[in-house]
Amino acid sequence: MSRDNDAPTGLVLLAFVMGAVTGAAAALLWAPAKGEETRRYLNDRAREGRDRANDAAQRGREFVSQQREQLATAVDRGRDIYERARERATGSSIDDATHLEDESAEKQA
């Protein structure tokens, strides 16, 4: 199941890498600075982009985890409420039937 959740993250990272490569190529073509300066600049930008992508991915994983926990809690609460309501409905109909049987037995006696 975790592989299904990683698919959108993988696509985002792939898109990021493709954008970074395209941007680097464009920067090299139109760069007015020297090669060493340009490489340093691109390295810094790539590092910043990687850090942002890692931060975004971490926040996304935390968000998904939190939502999964909230959903599990809601499902558990719903299940408990359903079970209690079912027990009350089943228990009250049994109690009502027992009570009616007791009343009819008293009337006959």
Image (cartoon, helix red, strand yellow):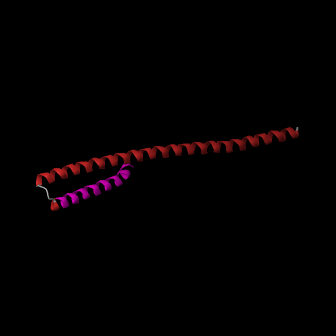
Residue 25 vs residue 10, the one in the foreground: 25
Residue 7 vs residue 87, the one in the foreground: 7
Instruction: Classify residue 84 by image quadrant.
Output: top right
**Residue, x 34% and y 52% (percent of image)?**
9
45 relative position to 89: left or right: left
Instruction: Give the position of the C terminus as an image quadrant.
Output: top right
**Residue, x 34% and y 48% (percent of image)?**
57
Instruction: Classify residue 86 by image quadrant.
Output: top right
- Whether residue 97 appears in magenta in the rendering, the answer is no
Q: Residue 55 appears at what percent x and percent y?
A: 32, 46
**Residue, x 53% and y 45% (percent of image)?**
74
Instruction: Classify residue 97 by image quadrant.
Output: top right
Query: Which contiguous range is marked in magenta?
Result: 1-27
How many numbered callouts?
A: 0
Q: Residue 27 appears at what percent x and percent y?
A: 18, 59
Residue 96 vs residue 59, the one in the foreground: 59
61 relative position to 90: left or right: left
66 relative position to 107: left or right: left
Q: Residue 6 appears at what percent x and percent y?
A: 35, 51
**Residue, x 19% and y 50% (percent of image)?**
43
Q: Residue 85 appears at what percent x and percent y?
A: 64, 44
| 36 to 83, vertically: above or below | below
Magenta stretch, overall SS: helix
The furthest residue to the front: 32
- Whether residue 7 appears in magenta in the rendering, the answer is yes
96 relative position to 73: left or right: right
